[in-house]
Image: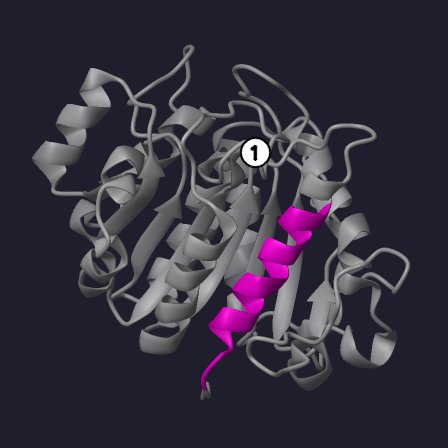
Amino acid sequence: MPSANRFKSLGANGNFLGIEKEISAFQTSRIVVIPAPYEHTVSYGGGTRLGPQAILKASRYVEHYDEELGTELCETVGVATLPPIAFGKSANERAVQKIYRLVKDILAEDKFVAVIGGEHTISQAPIKAHLEKYPDLSVIQFDAHADLRETYEGTKFSHACVMARVCEFMDAKRIVQVGIRALCVEEADFILQKGINTQYAHEIRGRSNWISRILPSLSQHVYVTFDVDGLDPSIMPSTGTPEPNGLYWSETMNLLRLIGKQKQIVGFDVVEFAPIRGYHHPDYTAAKLTYKLMNYAFSKNRP
């Protein structure tokens, strides 16, 4: 069992929400934020390595009180932020393993883990660590892209392959994809063959009951992997591969709220945020999304 003393959290000048030591120390916080500025396989616009720092900076301006849930979560459960992972020359499998070991160690301390990236490749690591703790785990993927390619641009550790890697260690039928609107024919075939519950963006627009179709597919313990390009570019332009006809804020929050109410969100990541210099509203949106995910995860009593 790792010792909690090995984990040093960032101070108010650098941590998530810019909060004081009393509610951001690792030992006393229920939530731990892991910045993972990994960028190795982006295929269009770059900058995801800058995403975690931009989210942390913008989070200082997010109100601590959630008017929807009537809570001031950081004050009641504490939110610790670790220093960003230093990847150095680690890439592909070595980088994934570095994240996996860290998340696994923090889960062993009975913490709730939130990872902020970084490209989507990183998500396979916390998903695997959470699956080992919660064997019934299901995953909901907010994304414009299916990310189910076997390989892409010469590597199976591309951001375009992350969910294919996840399918190697968990049942594909326990994956739900929301907002998909860009994929190749092989990925479409993979979805049908493996039984993945994929809610395409064009289908969401044509159904009033699309959220109710998702919830029964999720197990009690749910991991959320949120690629910000799942959101419409009108509210989230700061991502490497923006796709039109994306999800809007209110419908996304409606779904996350119900998952938090009816299931148990046990961990999440927010990835593929690539800040645009001088364009601040997407930074704030990504930070607000991160805090809303925390609030929904703790929206009902947890043991």
The C terminus - image quarter: bottom left
| First to last magenta residue range | 284-300
Q: Secondary structure at mark 1?
A: loop
Left or right placement of residue 77 versus residue 167 in this view: right
Asked if 94 appears above or below 225 in the picture, the reply is: above
Q: Position of residue 39 (x, y in %)?
A: 62, 28
Number of residue marks: 1
Q: Is residue 203 above or below residue 34?
A: above
Looking at the image, is 155 positioned above or below residue 68? above
The picture places residue 198, in percent across and down from the top left corner, at 23, 41
Relative to 90, say whether 262 is above or below: below
| Residue farthest to the right, as pictured | 13
Q: Which residue is mark 1?
A: 234
Q: Nearer the viewer, residue 287 or 1?
A: 287
Whether residue 157 is visible: no
At label 1, counting other C-alpha atoms closer than 10 Å, the crowd grade (few under 14, some 14-19, many 20 or more) is: some
Residue drawn 78% across the image and 50% down it: 58
Q: Position of residue 221 (x, y in %)?
A: 33, 69
Query: Magenta includes 277?
Result: no
Identified at 35% across, 40% down, the residue is: 179
Quarter of the figure that contains the N terminus: bottom right
The coloring applied to the image is one colour
Residue drawn at (29%, 29%), measured in percent from left and top? 148
Residue 143 visible in rendering: yes
Residue 229 as seen in the image, left or right of residue 32: left
Q: Residue at x 45, y 25 (%)?
A: 243
Q: Main secondary structure of the magenta part?
A: helix
